[in-house]
C-alpha cells in the first residue's frame, strides 16, 4: 500500500484533532445508517472501511462481524482511531494508513466494504467504485454515505477548486444523487436501499455486488 502522504492526507492530518472533537452533525441520521448497515452484517464477515477517519464507525460495527480492517489517508486520523480502539478494548479492529487506489487486500477476501463520507472526496468516483468492486465477490455488500452536492449545493462546484487552492478544502467533487446512483450501478452493484434524510444531507446507499 502506498504510504506517501499526498496533499489531501496533509489536509486531514492538519484538521484531525479538531475533527475528532466535532460533534456528529445529525446523530439520528448517523444512528439510522449504523442500524441499517448492521441489518446486512453477519458474524462471519470481514469488513473493510475506506476513509475511516477517527474510527468510530469501525468500532461500532466490530461487534457484528469477525474482523474490521479500517483505512484512512491521514496518519493522525489513524493515531486517534487506534487510541479509541485501545480505550474501548476492542480486539477485532485493525487500522492502517493507506489510499484507496493503492490498496492491496491480503490473502483473505472481504465480505463488505464501507465508504462513509468518501466518494465525494476522491478525484474520480468511477475509478474508486471500480476499485471497490474489484475487492468483492457477487452478493457481497457495499455501503456508502456521500454528500451529493449536485442536488442542493451546485454552486460549490465553483467554490471547491478555489478552497482547495487556498488550502481550505481537500479535493471535493460535486455530483448529484442520480449521477452517483448511475456510477454505483455501472460499477457492478445493485442498490437495495437508499435514503437521504433531508436536503443538503448525505445520500446513503446499500448495494450488493452482482
Image: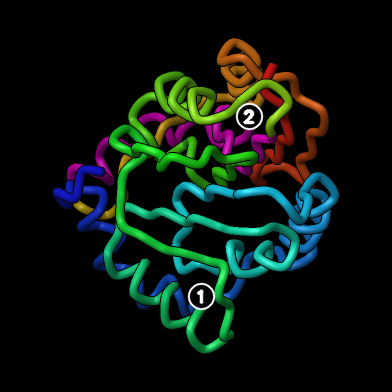
Q: Nearer the viewer, residue 174 or 120?
A: 120
> With 132 as the anchor, is 163 left or right in this view?
left
- The structure residue drawn at horizontal position 74% and vertical position 19%, both measured from the top left corner, is 190
For image coordinates 45% across by 61% down, the residue present is 53
User: Is 198 included in the stretch rendered in magenta?
Assistant: no
Give SS at disc 2. Answer: helix
> Start and end of the magenta stretch?
141-166
Position in image of residue 79 (x %, y %): 34, 74
Residue 70, given in percent of the width and then of the height, sits at 47, 56
Q: Nearer the viewer, mark 2 or mark 1?
A: 1
Q: Quadrant of residue 102?
A: top left
Which residue is drawn at the image coordinates 82% and 28% (left, top)? Answer: 192
> Where is residue 116 shown, x and y percent of the image?
57, 48
The image quarter containing residue 182 is top right
Q: Which residue is mark 1?
A: 22
Classify residue 76 as left or right of residue 70.
Answer: left
Circle number at residue 151: 2
Q: Nearer the viewer, residue 67 or 3?
A: 67
Amino acid at each position: 500500500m502506498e504510504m506517501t502522504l499526498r496533499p489531501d492526507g496533509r489536509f486531514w492530518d492538519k484538521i484531525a484533532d479538531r475533527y475528532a472533537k466535532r460533534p456528529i452533525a445529525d446523530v439520528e441520521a448517523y444512528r439510522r445508517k449504523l442500524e441499517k448497515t448492521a441489518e446486512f452484517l453477519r458474524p462471519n464477515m470481514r469488513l473493510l472501511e475506506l476513509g475511516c477517519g477517527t474510527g468510530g464507525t469501525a468500532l461500532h460495527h466490530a461487534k457484528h462481524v469477525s474482523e474490521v480492517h479500517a483505512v484512512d489517508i491521514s496518519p493522525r486520523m489513524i493515531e486517534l482511531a487506534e487510541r479509541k480502539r485501545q480505550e474501548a478494548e476492542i480486539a477485532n479492529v485493525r487500522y492502517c494508513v493507506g489510499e484507496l487506489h493503492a490498496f492491496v487486500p491480503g490473502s483473505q477476501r472481504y465480505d463488505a466494504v464501507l465508504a462513509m463520507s468518501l466518494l465525494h472526496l476522491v478525484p474520480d468516483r468511477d475509478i474508486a467504485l471500480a476499485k471497490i468492486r474489484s475487492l468483492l465477490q457477487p452478493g457481497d455488500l457495499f455501503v456508502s454515505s456521500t454528500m451529493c452536492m449536485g442536488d442542493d449545493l451546485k454552486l460549490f462546484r465553483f467554490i471547491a477548486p478555489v478552497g482547495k487552492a487556498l488550502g481550505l478544502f481537500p479535493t471535493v467533487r460535486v455530483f448529484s444523487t442520480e449521477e452517483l446512483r448511475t456510477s454505483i450501478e455501472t460499477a457492478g452493484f445493485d442498490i437495495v436501499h437508499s435514503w437521504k434524510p433531508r436536503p443538503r444531507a448525505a445520500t446513503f446507499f446499500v448495494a450488493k455486488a452482482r
